[in-house]
Image (cartoon, rainbow, N blue to C red):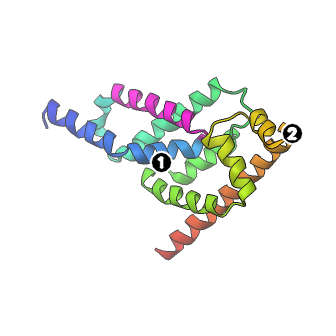
């Protein structure tokens, strides 16, 4: 394979896994803006490592491994944010997905279904915090609650969503 053909194949593989790679990163980082930043950094890193492409058997797993390290670097830079998953949970999420970014479409569908099942008040809380990307104290002010109660509710909701997604993926896996 010529250098040009190899470059085209690499770019095709990189472009082909963007949606799944983003979903994988988003699974590890709860905020979309952070996930987008990490995806960009991951893409830059992968472009710098293009020479390794010839020896890569599973591009998705290779890309996901580099994304995982970018997530860790991002977390280290943002350690003051109290809403980050702890390292043990992050490692568990990464291990459970096994770097198989093709499974992420099912996870996104499951998450969407689980979000649809939230109560109206929980859904509003999640949307204010994550879709609108507002700080907990801002959400608390909007909802006339304390920041501590909002943070506690968000923690409970995230736990419930994680369990719901796990059950749905398990049920989906049991059907195949």
The residue positioned 45% from the left and 52% from the top of the image is: 100
Q: Is residue 120 left or right of residue 115?
A: right
Residue 44 lies within the magenta run: yes
Q: Is residue 56 visible?
A: no
Characterize the local packing of mark 1: few (<14), some (14-19) or many (20 or more) Cα atoms within 10 angstroms: many
Q: Is residue 153 visible?
A: yes
Inter-mark Cα distance, 1 to 2: 38 Å
Q: Do the residues under discs 1 and 2 have CB atoms within 8 angstroms?
A: no
User: Where residue 37 is drawn, which disc sits there?
Assistant: none
Q: Which residues are magenta?
A: 29-48
Name the foreground residue: 113 vs 145: 145
How would you classify the magenta stretch by its main secondary structure? Answer: helix
* Quadrant of the snapshot with the N terminus: top left
Identify the residue under disc 2: 146
> In the figure, 125 relative to 14: above or below?
below
> In the figure, 66 relative to 161: above or below?
above
User: Where residue 99 is drawn, which disc sits there?
Assistant: 1
Characterize the local packing of mark 2: few (<14), some (14-19) or many (20 or more) Cα atoms within 10 angstroms: some
The residue positioned 41% from the left and 27% from the top of the image is: 45
- Quadrant for residue 62, please give it: top left
Secondary structure beneath disc 1?
loop
Task: Name the spot of residue 22 as percent of width and height, x first.
Answer: 47, 42
Name the foreground residue: 48 vs 15: 15
Which mark's residue is nearer the viewer, 1 or 2? Answer: 2
Q: Is residue 57 left or right of residue 84?
A: left
Q: Is residue 90 left or right of residue 148?
A: left
Task: Name the spot of residue 28 as percent of width and height, x first.
Answer: 58, 43
The residue positioned 28% from the left and 29% from the top of the image is: 51
Task: Name the spot of residue 35 as percent of width and height, x first.
Answer: 53, 37
* Nearer-N-terminus badge (1/2): 1
Residue 54 lies within the magenta run: no
Secondary structure beneath disc 2?
loop
């Amino acid at each position: 394979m010529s250098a040009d053909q190899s470059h085209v194949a690499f770019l095709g593989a990189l472009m082909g896994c963007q949606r799944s790679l983003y979903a994988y990163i988003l699974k590890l980082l709860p905020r979309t803006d952070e996930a987008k930043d990490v995806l960009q950094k991951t893409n830059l890193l992968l472009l710098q490592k293009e020479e390794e492409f010839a020896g890569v058997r599973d591009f998705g797993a290779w890309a996901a491994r580099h994304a995982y390290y970018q997530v860790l670097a991002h977390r280290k830079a943002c350690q003051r944010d109290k809403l980050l998953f702890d390292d043990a949970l992050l490692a568990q999420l990464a291990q459970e997905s096994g770097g198989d970014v093709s499974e992420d479409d099912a996870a996104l569908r499951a998450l969407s279904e689980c979000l649809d099942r939230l109560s109206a008040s929980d859904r509003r809380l999640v949307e204010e915090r994550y879709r609108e990307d507002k700080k907990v104290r801002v959400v608390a002010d909007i909802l006339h609650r304390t920041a501590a109660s909002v943070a506690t509710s968000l923690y409970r909701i995230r736990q419930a969503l994680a369990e719901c997604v796990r059950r749905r993926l398990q049920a989906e896996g049991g059907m195949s």
